[in-house]
Amino acid sequence: MTKASFENPGVHLPWAGKPVRMEEAEEILTSLWHLSADNVRISQNVNVRASVLNFVICAPDIATAQRASSLLRDLCSTHIARVILLILDTSESSPTEVSTWVTLRSFPVISDIMRHNFEQITIMLSGSALRSAATIIQPLLKPELPIYLWWLQDPPRDETLFSHLAQTSNRVIVDSESFLQPENSLARLAAHLQDTAENSSWALSDLNWGRITPWRQLVAQFFDVPAYQDYLSGIYQIEIEHAISPTRDTTGANGSSPTTPTVNPTRALLFSAWLLKSLNWQIDTANERNQHHPETGEHSWHTSHATGKLQLPGTDELLVHSGRGSITIRPRVEPALTPGSLCLVRILSALDDKHATFAIDRADGAEYAITSVELPEGTRHQRTVSLGQSSSRIASTLLHDELEILGHDRLFEAALNEVYRLLVE
């Protein structure tokens, strides 16, 4: 038998609003709107209630849910109609319970005179109620409005819960920056997307894809220059570096060991996959020199692709057949950067015995990078470019962008499928 939150005195969520029975949620929200209207008449404020979407957030615990709830303040311009914040208690020892809270959120749009309002329903599920999450929230969704699902942290190993919620949604959003098992979780997402591709109507996106957009644009800009375009066919080596936190020596009297650096190469993997697809390179899966070290974030693959004759720099070796190349991912210790932030992209090309290097190198901890081109003549063109908020963009900014898109991002989905081939096949 399920219990409402007010029957469980051990759960107190003041930030979530008023504890109610689920069947009373609509009635209580209506009364809150009436109260809000009365306040508007008294204060001469203007309430904005433009409703264009349902926003479902799935959090693994109360602390994560509260952070997500606080972040909603920055999304007031997206005209959310209703937020359903699901707290999924997957502890095996938890009894079956459904606890519900409702509140009316109000934030200033231009000034305090004009305010944006939306409804928030917080639901904590545990025990066997988890299996019915999609069914439980269905009557609470605003009809005829698109449904966006934001899944916080790693997708669950039990795909049933994730699958059922995804199938009720138009768009599923994740943030691989927060994954605790980044490579396994990316591979699971890709596999899930492939399994449901034929009969699925929901689109998938990753906030980390938005974080690497400026880097993808900078690479594309290299080869927008007519003088550099021929070097595209001669690319034979790509190097990518991503930030990791430094190892901190915490060894003391209690015998504790040094801390392990935080490793999350998801941005580098997505960037590598995008380059492979763009260049039409194929991974040589039989090559014994391919390396995978998830614990350190180091990877290297050897590839084959169509090209002309290539003479490798510093050697007399000449490749006269279909081109072979390599793409390498490695970590760089950067204390001031979020783990996983891109630090370096270097592209080496050889064309008719002429060699060129294209590089994007991020200054230590800075929000800018130095792009450079080394040409056969020995000239070196450099410029400093702003990365804006590329690698440190807060989730709300990225999330705002995602809530403006309803359809599939085919470029991202193709890159994610390529990541699956890199990690699994």
Image (cartoon, rainbow, N blue to C red):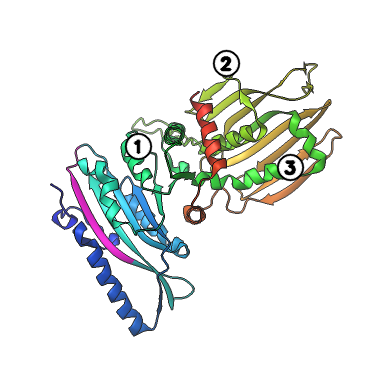
Instruction: Locate residue 156, reporting x and y percent.
Output: 35, 37
Can residue 213 be seen here? The reply is: yes
Residue drawn at 33 percent across, 42 percent down: 164
User: Which residue, given by chain and number where applicable, does mark 3 sit on?
Assistant: 222
Question: Disc 1 marks which amino acid?
Answer: Pro
Do the numbered discs 1 and 2 sit on residues whose CB atoms are within 8 Å?
A: no
* Residue 117 coordinates in the image, percent (x, y): 38, 68
The residue that label 1 is drawn on is 156
Say the numbered circle drawn on residue 286.
2
Q: Is residue 195 magenta?
A: no
Q: Disc 1 to disc 3, how far (Cα)?
A: 40 Å
Q: How many marks?
A: 3
Q: Between residue 96 and residue 293, name the one nearer to us.
A: 96
| Secondary structure mainly formed by the magenta segment | strand
Q: Is residue 337 visible?
A: no
Left or right for 218, reference 70: right
| Tag 1 secondary structure | loop
* In front of the other: 265 or 97: 97
Boundaries of the magenta span: 93-104
From what the image shows, is residue 108 above or below residue 259? below
Is the residue marked by circle 2 packed among few (<14), some (14-19), or many (20+) residues within 10 Å?
few
Secondary structure, mark 3, is helix
